[in-house]
Image (tube, rainbow, N blue to C red):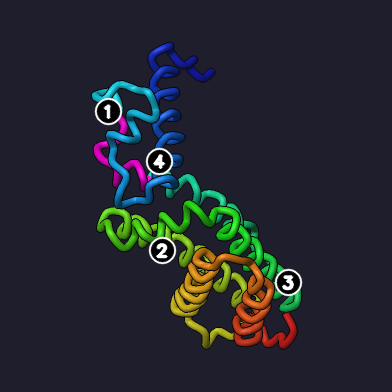
Amino acid sequence: MKNKLTNRDKQAQETKRKLMKSAHHVFLQNGFEKTTISQIIKNAGVGYGTAYVYFKNKHELFITVMEEVMQDFFKVANQEFRPATPEEACSRIKNQVRDYMSLAIKHRPIMKVVKDAIGSSEEIETEWGNIRNEFIQGITTDIKHSQDKQLVNTAFNPFITAKNWYYMNEMFMWELVDADNNENLELIVQQLSLFYTSALYGVSDS
């Protein structure tokens, strides 16, 4: 039987929730560089000293905000990938690309802040590298599975191929984040998927 949360635990959770909500709002409003931890604390309406129990600085707080947003992306990336045929693999890959890019559009305002933060904070850049590596490892696993099922030529190095595939997706993700419209979404999805699946699975129309 799980222990019930004490009043102190509940209060701590509520304080952290307020800080997270406030941080998301203030970072969106001011951008990463112009945001201060004091602004976030004031907006959250929590005690100044209390806030530092949970986050030592704005960098650490932004990393938590960034990780929370990226959970949506990981839900797409971590979908079970066990195709039985090349055609099934290609269909799933194309859908994943579309879902991934659509999330970039959905979260465009905060992802713009993420992009700026990566370029101005070593801590955030390091954490983005960890996020990137997690995606690459997942793709590597999927490629290995396809090779085990003899759907993909074993001449492809799974890790190098996965890394190449991820970086292409990230590049176009940032392009969509920076755009003022979504008109290139389907073209990007179609061309990215075609490039990748025709090389790995030999399917010319994904």
User: Marks 4 and 2, how far apart in space?
Assistant: 28 Å
Badge 1: few (under 14), some or many (20 or more) residues near its Cα, within 10 Å? few
Quadrant in the picture for residue 181: bottom right
| SS of the residue under disc 1 | helix
Q: Earlier in the sequence, mark 4 or mark 2?
A: 4
Q: Is residue 122 above or below residue 67?
A: below
Residue designated by label 2: 133
Identity of the residue drawn at 41% across and 17% down: 11
Mark 4 or 2, closer to the camera: 4
Q: Quadrant of residue 199?
A: bottom right
Span highlighted in magenta in the image: 54-63
Residue highlighted by disc 1: 53
Instruction: Name the amino acid type tagged 4.
Output: Val
Mark 1 residue type: Val
In this figure, which residue is indicated by the disc labeled 3? Answer: 91
Q: Position of residue 165 (x, y in %)?
A: 51, 76
Chain-order first, disc 4 or disc 3: 4
Q: CA distance from mark 3 to mark 2?
A: 24 Å
Q: Disc 4 designates what residue?
A: 26
Task: Tell me: residue 197, above or below residue 48.
Answer: below
Q: Amino acid at mark 3?
A: Ser
In the image, which is nearer the foreground, mark 4 or mark 3? 4
